[in-house]
Image (cartoon, rainbow, N blue to C red):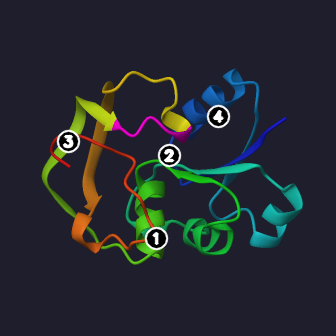
Amino acid sequence: MHKVLIIDNYDSFVYNLAQYIGELGWEPIVYRNDKITLAEIEKLAPSHIILSPGPCTPLEAGISNDIVGYFGGKIPILGVCLGHQCIGYVYGGKIVRALVPVHGKTSLIHHDGETIYQGLTNPFPATRYHSLIIEPQSLPSCLKVTAKTLDG
C-alpha cells in the first residue's frame, strides 16, 4: 500500500487532499508543518509526499522547504498552491505576484498526459485560487512544467 505523507501548511484544504488519497486506497498521514522532523519522516518511509496549500509564502511554510531540499529526487513530492511555491522556491524559482490574481475561477489545464495526468482528459477544468506564482523565467532546468493554463 502507498503511504502518503501530507504536510499541513495550516489550511483546511489538507483534509480534502487526505480524503482523495484515501479514496485511491492509499494511506494518508497528515502532520502540521511544525509538528514533524526530517528524521521522523524518514522513519515513516512515505512512498509520496504532498505539501498542502496555506497562508503566506514559502518562508513561513515550516518544514516544507526542508522536505523539498532533503527528499526531492528521492520521494515524489506534489505541491498544491503554497506547496507548489515551496518546490519552486527551493530550486531557485522566484515567487512573484500574479499579474491577475485568480480566486475561485475555473480554467482549462493543459498537461503532458504523463504521471499524475495519465487517463485525464486534456485539457481538464480545475478551480484556481492564487495570487502568487513562480516566475516562469526563473524556473531552473531541473524542473519540468507538466501542466499549465493558456495564460501560463
Residue 8: x %, y % from top left:
59, 51
Q: Which residue is mark 2?
A: 11
Crowd tier of the residue under label 3, counting other residues whose Cα lies within 10 Å: few below 14, some 14–19, many 20 or above: some
Front label number (4 vs 1)? 1
Q: Which residue is mark 3?
A: 102
The residue lying toward the viewer, choosing from 141 and 3, is 141
Element type at mark 2 = loop
Element type at mark 3 = strand
Q: Say which label, 1 or 3, has the lower sequence index.
A: 3
Residue 115: x %, y % from top left:
55, 40
Crowd tier of the residue under label 1, counting other residues whose Cα lies within 10 Å: few below 14, some 14–19, many 20 or above: few
Distance of mark 4 from mark 1, alpha carbons?
A: 28 Å
Q: Say which label, 2 or 4, has the lower sequence index.
A: 2
Distance of mark 2 from mark 3, alpha carbons?
A: 18 Å
Check residue 120 in the rendering and tell me which mark sits there, or answer none. none
Check residue 142 in the rendering and tell me which mark sits there, or answer none. 1
Specify the amino acid type for callout 1.
Cys
Q: Which residue is mark 4?
A: 18
Q: Which residues are magenta?
A: 111-115
Specify the amino acid type for callout 3.
Val
Residue at (24% x, 40% y) in the render: 149
Q: Say which label, 3 or 4, has the lower sequence index.
A: 4
Q: Is residue 2 above or below residue 140?
A: above
Distance of mark 2 from mark 1, alpha carbons?
A: 28 Å
Q: Is residue 5 above or below residue 87?
A: above
Specify the amino acid type for callout 2.
Asp
Crowd tier of the residue under label 2, counting other residues whose Cα lies within 10 Å: few below 14, some 14–19, many 20 or above: some
Give the dominant element type of the magenta stretch: helix, strand or loop. Answer: loop
